[in-house]
Amino acid sequence: GNSVTQMEGPVTLSEEAFLTINCTYTATGYPSLFWYVQYPGEGLQLLLKATKADDKGSNKGFEATYRKETTSFHLEKGSVQVSDSAVYFCALTTNTGNQFYFGTGTSLTVIP
Amino acid sequence: DAGVTQSPTHLIKTRGQQVTLRCSPKSGHDTVSWYQQALGQGPQFIFQYYEEEERQRGNFPDRFSGHQFPNYSSELNVNALLLGDSALYLCASSLGIGELFFGEGSRLTVL
């Protein structure tokens, strides 16, 4: 079946620290991979995506590389800001595209 | 350009009641999906509507039903509410099977 596993949170970092949030997946077929972010009181927003192996998605200083050999899509940012405090969800959809499978989310708090 | 809008934003019901949640998709989008997000969990797929038909359904009981109108807006109905139905209900729209755009959700509390 299809599923996503994210590292447990919550994660607390100081401003300008390096961020890694691990995500691994199980999928039938050839999935597309996504990171969504949910700020307090808001809906989910797409942060970045990758549609095939070795693709790198990037946005707002965040990056993630689609690693087929390790079935992973880890999220990284070199220097986090207080405004990055949010819940981050890793997700996949298969080539039918009808259903997205989300991880349980990782809460990030960045302190000044 | 209006994004995905949902109503109501918050509502409280009692067990056994019925609820209807509404969603207007982002302009130009023709596909609407509904997700349930329990507290501290990721969104779980309920179903997807395209051309006024349910195209795919997740692992939810028949108490959960939906509808899509000719203008692509959609409703989610839940009958015989249970305490466990308390959650944030998210509507997402897309153009076909493209990227999902989410609304801010309707938070349902069942007492």
Image (cartoon, helix red, strand yellow):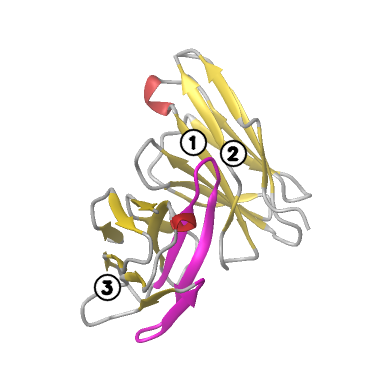
Is A78 inside the magenta-drawn segment? Answer: no
Q: Secondary structure at mark 2?
A: strand
| Tags 2 and 3 on a common chain | no
> Disc 2 marks which residue?
B66
| Tags 1 and 3 on a common chain | no
Q: Amino acid at mark 2?
A: Gly
> Please, which residue is most extreme toward the left here?
A70
Q: Distance from label 1 to label 3 (Cα)?
A: 28 Å
Q: Is residue B68 above or below residue B78?
A: below
Mark 3 — on which chain does it sit?
A: A
Q: The C terminus of chain A is located in which quarter?
A: bottom left
Mark 1 — on which chain does it sit?
A: B
Q: Is residue B69 above or below residue A81?
A: above
Residue segment shown in magenta: A32-60
Q: Secondary structure at mark 3?
A: loop
Assess whether mark 3 and mark 2 are in contact (beta carbons under 8 angstroms). no
Residue at horizontal 59 percent and vertical 43 percent from the top: B104
> Disc 1 marks which residue?
B88
Q: Nearer the viewer, mark 2 or mark 3?
A: 3
Mark 2 — on which chain does it sit?
A: B
- Left or right: B5 as drawn, with respect to A54: right
Crowding near the residue tagged with mark 2, few <14, some 14–19, many ≥20 C-alpha atoms within 10 Å? many
Is the magenta region chiefly helix, strand or loop?
strand
Q: Is residue B24 above or below residue A94?
A: above
> Disc 3 marks which residue?
A72
Residue at horizontal 22 percent and vertical 82 percent from the top: A69
Camera-side residue: A35 or A110?
A110
Q: Distance from label 2 to label 3 (Cα)?
A: 34 Å
Mark 1 or mark 2, which is nearer the start of the sequence? 2
